Image: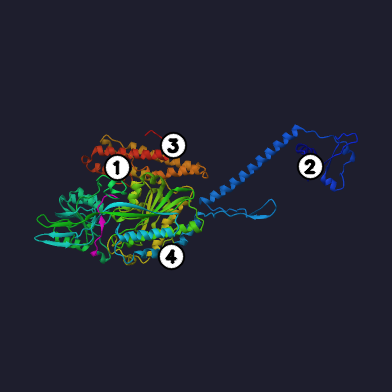
Amino acid sequence: MDHARAAISNLFGGEPTSYTRFSIARQMDGDNSHVEMKLAADEEEGGEIGRPEHLHASMAPPRRNGKNLCFLIIAAVLLLLIGILIGYLSYRGRMQRVNRCLDGSGNCEMTPTASYFSDDGTEEEEVPGPRILYWPELRNMLSAKLSAARLESNLRQREGKSSFEAGKPEDQDTASHVHDQFTSFRLDDVWNDEHYVRLQDKGSSKNQVFIIEDSEEELESRDAYVAYSKSGTVTGKPIYVNYGRKEDFQTVRNMHVPMNGSIIIFRAGKITLAEKVANAKKEGAVGALMYLSSSNNKKADSCVPFGHAHFGTGDPFTPGFPSFNHTQFPPVESSGLPHIPVQTISREAATKLFGKMDGEKCLQEWMSGIMGCKVTVGGSSKMTVKLTVNNVMVDRKIVNIFGVIKGFEEPDRYVVLGAQRDSWGPGAAKAGVGTAILLELARVISDMVKNDDYRPRRSIIFASWSAGEYGAVGATEWLEGYSTTLHAKAFTYINLDTAVLGSKHVKISASPLLYSLLEATMKRVKDPMKESGYLYNRVGSDWINRVVPLDLDNAAFPFLAYSGIPVVSFGFYDEDDEYPFLGTTEDTLANLKEKTGMLYPLMRAAAEVAGQIALRLTHDHELFLDFDRYSDELLSFQEKIWHFEPDVKALGLTLNWLYFARGDFQRAADALRRDIANSDRENRIVRRALNDRMMKVEYDFLSPYLSPKDAPFRHIFFGKGSHTLKSLLENLEQLEVDKTSVDVNELKEQLALATWTIKGAANALVGDIWNTDNEI
């Protein structure tokens, strides 16, 4: 140690202040080579301890040795490296614990350093960072903040008004109210999106329905109308076709009742009015009438519903294009327009019309509670029905309102919650409930971010749509306007429309990617109709078998079938006694409360389901999208078609390529699951890449071999058209019944589209091009 101190002294040529003191005594002959070194501690003790004085006198002068310098440098470097390593390991261990807490994967307890000591020995308090919210805590916070009283207040904003037609002053006033509310909630950004769309309005004179026998008798003339109906007057023989489904028309054909030139009558339900009208048009009908199905509420017998007949979504006069400005587009129109007059009538009018018909009686399951139900008139009868429609086309500006809470890590990835704002009548159930829930969720989640340290990883967008009554026009035009980016950034749409239509049953429509998340959510949301228990206890473990397919009137449909974005639509209803006033002038708050006395607790439960889904998707490191569900869906489809293989082989075709493609998707899903399990969850770049692969699964089921303009709903599971797996199955079933009725070339094309769309989805799921299996 003495040698080391001496070396340090020689190296720097100075006098240390605390360790040693060097004394150089000049000798008599002027030689100053005698060096005396004394330890400061020794001097304080009064001299050298345990050492004879002659040892100092005989000590040789130290040398400036290069080895000393080398040792010092190596020691300093080693100490520096050890310090860096210790610091890194300490930081890494701390961050691992933080990330485990952030991802909500389990309970973890962090014990942060409360204080530390500075160099001068004084204690300093550590500056606290943002509070870490685990998923159970976040879920409970949402539940505690949701207020049934605020939901009621939001819903009562529509009271006292008879209509909120898209683009009219009442709709514009509601849009301003939503905008102001979003602003007051301190959302990160609030903006409007304007579209100029072509809608249809009732004309100056009412639409009329007449019964013509020996004379002309008016059956009904009401304010209600069907948008996008052809205007004009038609006359034809009345024919009743139950719900207007394909199988219902097949039943009438089996009765050998000619439908060409007739006016088709059907009741509401099962499928949309637009689909019913499209089926009637295919049979050669010249017009169509629809009435409300039976209800336990007799007030509904006199109600006439509004509706639209466009077999599609969005503005039918700018198909595939956003309606930002009509003058920029050629004069084209959607192929889904009916080109026949269509009108709705009351149950009372339908009963009177059936009473005039003298033909074959209805099947028992077709009667719908109407006494004297007939399929058509007798062969010798001259009775006909005349329908006059006076609708007019109008150009209107509609406004969608948006607000956003931006994510802290990935603001360019977002969940969208949306609700329709407009309605032909008061629209308490049709638009009021959804808008009230939308506003409450925006308030609560913003409050969690601003005041409770919630830091969502991804963004949450709140959307208020206009012109939903005309076929999700506002939502579709937004999707069309930003189609090139939305499918890559929006990874879930949560629909809030018609969330409460009853109380006895739960109605669910969703993408398979969200089944697992929805199930986990229902296990944590209490059932408002029971003192104890959760919603999952009500739906049961087999709830997936009762998932309702999305229809064209659901704003979630274009998100899924057009843009390839996973969706969920959740609500309460009575399966055996549906709310009869939907889409009528009697859709009032009073009638909705009469339907269910638990309106506001049910709204709160629906809001909690939607809120939990949105929060979980923006909270976790890994997106809660279960892509393995599509493997199950494909296997289920394979099980439905395998027994048609002999019929297919008889045509010189095979189903093997379709089976191989399904196997490829299964292997790709397994590979992605392994990649996720083996990945570094702390690496944001890797995690984002894996999440993006999951996000694209839905989009990759949009057939790339079809034009979005000609076939906008390209999803092979949930779309509309001959490219869907449903249409392929129908063709195979028809092949078994009558081979001559099947177009072989069309069947070949269907098999090719299905096979290569599934194969493409498998390749995309794998990830990098060099990992794909290019053999089929």
Distance (Cα) linking label 1 and label 2 = 91 Å
The mark nearer the N terminus, 3 or 2, is 2
Query: In what element is the residue under mark 1?
Result: loop
Distance (Cα) linking label 4 and label 3 = 52 Å
Residue matched to label 2: 15
Circle 1 crowding by C-alpha within 10 Å: few under 14, some 14–19, many from 20 = many
Q: Is 11 left or right of 559, judged from the image as shown?
A: right
Quadrant housing the C terminus: top left
User: Toward the viewer: 445 or 368?
Assistant: 445
Q: Nearer the viewer, mark 1 or mark 2?
A: 2
Is residue 304 covered in magenta? yes
Distance (Cα) linking label 1 and label 3 = 27 Å
The stretch in magenta equals 301-313
Q: Is 422 left or right of 388, judged from the image as shown?
A: right
Query: In what element is the residue under mark 4?
Result: loop
Q: Nearer the viewer, mark 4 or mark 1?
A: 1
The mark nearer the N terminus, 4 or 3, is 4
Instruction: Name which residue type carries label 3.
Output: Asp
Residue matched to label 4: 531
Residue matched to label 3: 768
The mark nearer the N terminus, 1 or 2, is 2
The mark nearer the N terminus, 4 or 2, is 2
Q: Position of residue 423 (x, y in %)?
A: 30, 59
Instruction: Name which residue type carries label 1.
Output: His
Instruction: Name which residue type carries label 4.
Output: Glu
The mark nearer the N terminus, 1 or 3, is 1
User: Overall secondary structure of the magenta stretch?
Assistant: loop
Q: Nearer the viewer, mark 3 or mark 2?
A: 2
Is residue 175 covered in magenta? no
